[in-house]
Amino acid sequence: MSEQDDGRSGHARGVTRRQTLGIGGALGLTAATGLATAAALARRPSFTGDELRSAVPLPPAFQVPLPIPAVLAPVSTAGSANRYEITQREATVEILPGVRTPMWTYGGTFPGPTIESRRGRPITVRHRNELPVPTVVHLHGGRTPASADGYPTDLVLPEGWPDATRTGQGGHSMGTRDMSGRGMGAHGMSGLGMGAHGRDAMHDPRAVVTGPTRGYTFPLNQRATLLWYHDHRMDFTAPAIWRGLAGLHIVRDDTEDALGLPAGRHELPLMIADRAFAADGSLDYPSLDPTLRNRPGVREPYLAGVLGDVILVNGAPWPVHEVDAARYRLRILNASNARHYELEVLTDDGRRIDLVQIGADQGLLAAPVTHRLLPMAPAERYDVIIDFAGVPVGARVRVVNRLGSGRTRDVMAFRVARKVTDRSRIPRVLSRDLPTWRRSDATRVREISFRAGRMHGGHGWLIDGKPFDPARSDVTVRFGDVEVWRLIADVHHPVHLHLVGFHVLARGGGRPLRHDAGLKDTISLRPGESAEIITRFDGYRGRYLFHCHNAEHEDMGMMANLEIV
């Protein structure tokens, strides 16, 4: 049976300035140094980050039609795998009406083309890099061998990139990083092991560097679900995603197809992301190095995360979509760098419409869960059904963000156009294949902290007090072992594990929240919160990552290596 929540926010409200500045010793250190981010956190505890304001006139809400990303056709379906090709290239895209915006794209569009695949049938996606910088492709949520997981130093170099290691033998050099921009190194410039300022650069002897093309093979031996692919280049993930390097990937299977869920035009993929625009129509982003070639990092006010003042859905600002008076399945991704959402669906006369959750990051729930408010952190995905049957023809339904203000409170709208016969359904039992790990199955309990701190003489975002180093082994687990991880945060940190899905066991010593149901790969930690997750480390051996998916935190040290042996 569906369960009804009580409408309470999943975010900590009523946090005082003293509480915000006092969350975690490392954040206290950061605040003591006078970082502007601490003040921003105190003003707006529902966010971690600061907002850019666009310098170009913005369109009114609910005027632009919702685009649906094109489904990418395979170049071959022969043999044991489907094969796809994507060219990463610069393109000029119309996002705001009448305004041309240069972007980095997968295949010339934003979002990139959607890949649809079948569970258990492998695919190979060959990417060609025609951008001016190296790239890395990560299939987020993919159950993928380490060689194709998109490790941040496994770069795909463009033609003419000056790196002696481009033959794929490894030895790639990365620059040292800190959040304030002091002592930054050259990321991938020469392979000589020295940073741009003459400091020793980090060295990864296991990096596999190729170019200008690379094929990623995904076995897809995993549950049907919504995944997404995005750039994962070390130190520069945040600005690369901001510039457009993100797309959807849907895995389907026969069991899900047989459930009778809304399908066809009644199934909508929705990639929600915020952006800001400069006066010339280009995307505004506070990079220390706008070329994204040498110096990672952002200007000091944005060290905690970059927020935009324009809400995009599938690359359109505050769009509207015409719907039937029927059930719709919404496959929602929060692809924002740092913005959190708390989604609510309202008619124009103020009536709230339920969000019936049927799936999480890693596929269908066991049974539906009904929400009035649905919190979403960066990189989280939710599979929900909205029923428009009770809405009069001609009426409008708005999706709003309870954590937004002004223009960022609106997300998108639906206009009910016609009555139809709706044969879809929401089964009381959605799936029976969810893993049933128990705490007693765990071979180990680990405690892992996510906090601000000192890094290379400046300010960083750290895991267990250390910034990311690709040459260091942080956590080693045995293949097949079940472990419980207790995750501890100072501010908001959406924590993502590569390769595996997990169940949320507890938050703050109590029960999980309602939106924690199902199998997840990203958990939103709230300020000062601890949470326990449980998973089995199987699938493949090799080197993977876990990290904060606030993309600015990730770039500024908040990643760690996970070795499965």
Image (tube, rainbow, N blue to C red):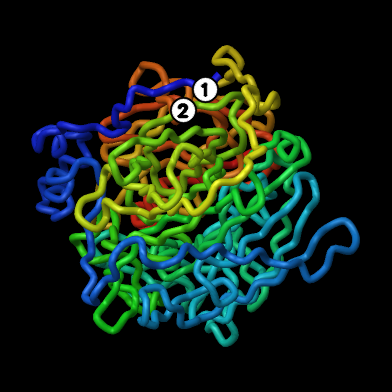
Near-viewer residue (482 or 397): 397
Q: Nearer the viewer, residue 107 or 232?
A: 107
Residue labelled with disc 2: 370
Q: Which mark is residue 2?
A: 1
Frontmost residue, 299 versus 221: 221
Q: Quadrant of the N terminus?
A: top right
Image coords of residue 176 (percent x, y) = 37, 63
Q: Position of residue 181 (x, y in %)?
A: 26, 66
Image quadrant holding the C terminus, namely top right
User: Given the image, on which type of amino acid does mark 2 rest?
Assistant: Thr
Is residue 342 shown left or right of residue 156?
left
Residue plotted at (32% across, 36% down): 351
Q: Is residue 250 above or below residue 291?
A: above
Seen from the viewer's position, the closer of residues 399 and 435 is 399
Task: Give x and y (percent) for residue 407.
Answer: 24, 58
Residue in view at x 64 percent, y 78 percent:
212
- Image quarter of residue 36: bottom left
Q: Secondary structure at mark 2?
A: strand
